[in-house]
Image (cartoon, rainbow, N blue to C red):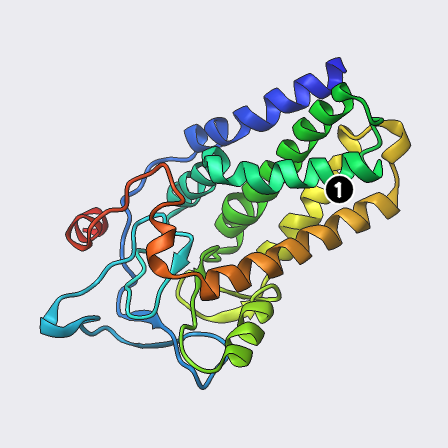
Amino acid sequence: MQRFFWWVCLALAAPQLLMAAVPGTQETLPDAPIPVADAANSMPRMQAQAPAASGGVVVYAPMYARTIFPGEVAPRLTVKGKFIYSFRQMVEPVNLVPTVFSAGESQLRNTDPKYGTDTGAFEQRIGAALIREDSDRLFTNAVLPSLLHEDPRYYRLGVGSTTARTEYALEQVFVGRTDSGKSIPNYAGFLGRAMAAGLTLAYYPDTSQGGGVVLRTLAASLGGLAAFNVMREFVPKEIFSHLTIFGHSSSAEAAQQTD
């Protein structure tokens, strides 16, 4: 139990320590091209910068938005920005919903991590789920995107049939993008989740140690990402502003942050 407590502390402290070690830089927009959705392709393509709204007003996405909507200019995330982006997700209360669901499902079926079925076991499962999910967010949204120069955000297609948009959302589990908007395999997303799954060997009980547990954890993580992508593709934009404890910057404020 003492070892588990220290892993919880390490997981919660890691983002602050890593952000403190990264020198601060100013957020900047890409030099010329900006990403926009293209219904004819599975990934948003690049086009020359142009006003994103009528009247010549450029609409900027909030600086740390997890979903970029069609017609929005996405402020470029620096290394420091990616760590802030990751940490904000760790402290969002709405993210406790999948944590509690995962722990509850494991408690009812007594699946991995096998802590038992009493009240104390459920609390341990909550702690393990928090470590697993936060390490997942740290690796996939900050550490690896910074090292590999990838953009961890989801770019909504927003047009086309329901089937086409669903296929696009599912493809994004395996398709990523560079900071400049180039389509690439989702190295950061896949490798980051594999690292988080492998880390469970350090804090899961002895009865839940082994390669099989790691592979099942990775599969569950990828499945959760697929479901989340579909949600981000179809949930109305207005709802997103109510799912965060952080205020969204206006277009003008976002523009000032990128100057």
Q: Which amino acid does label 1 sit on?
A: Gly
Choose top left, top right, bottom left or bottom right for residue 35: bottom left
Instruction: Name the secondary structure under disc 1.
Output: helix
Residue at the extreme top of the image, as rendered: 2
Q: Residue 159, image x and y in percent?
A: 40, 78
**Disc 1: CA contacts within 10 A as few (<14), some (14-19) or many (>=20):** some
Q: In this view, does 26 lie to the left or right of 177?
A: left
| Picture quadrant where residue 156 is located | bottom left
**Is 77 placed left or right of 188 in the picture?**
left
The answer to whether residue 9 is seen in the rendering is: yes
Residue 148 x %, y %: 53, 55
Placement of 123 over or under 195, stated as above or below: above
Is 32 situated above or below 206? Answer: below
Q: Can residue 187 be seen in this view?
A: no
As rendered, which of 218 and 181 lies closer to the eye?
A: 218
Q: Name the residue rendered at 62%, 66% in the picture.
A: 174
Residue occupied by mark 1: 198
What is the number of callouts on the image? 1
Give percent across and percent down for residue 249: 24, 47
Quadrant including the N terminus: top right
Q: Which residue is drawn at 74% across and 18% down?
A: 3
Say which of 246 and 23 sits in front. 246
75 vs 39: above or below: above
Residue at 58%, 37% in the rendered image: 134
Residue at screen point 43% across, 38% down: 88
Q: Which residue lies furthest to the left in this view?
A: 55
Q: Where is residue 162 in the image (x, y as percent from the top left)?
A: 51, 77
Image position of 28 with respect to 129: above or below: below
Whether residue 184 sits left or right of residue 58 in the image: it is right
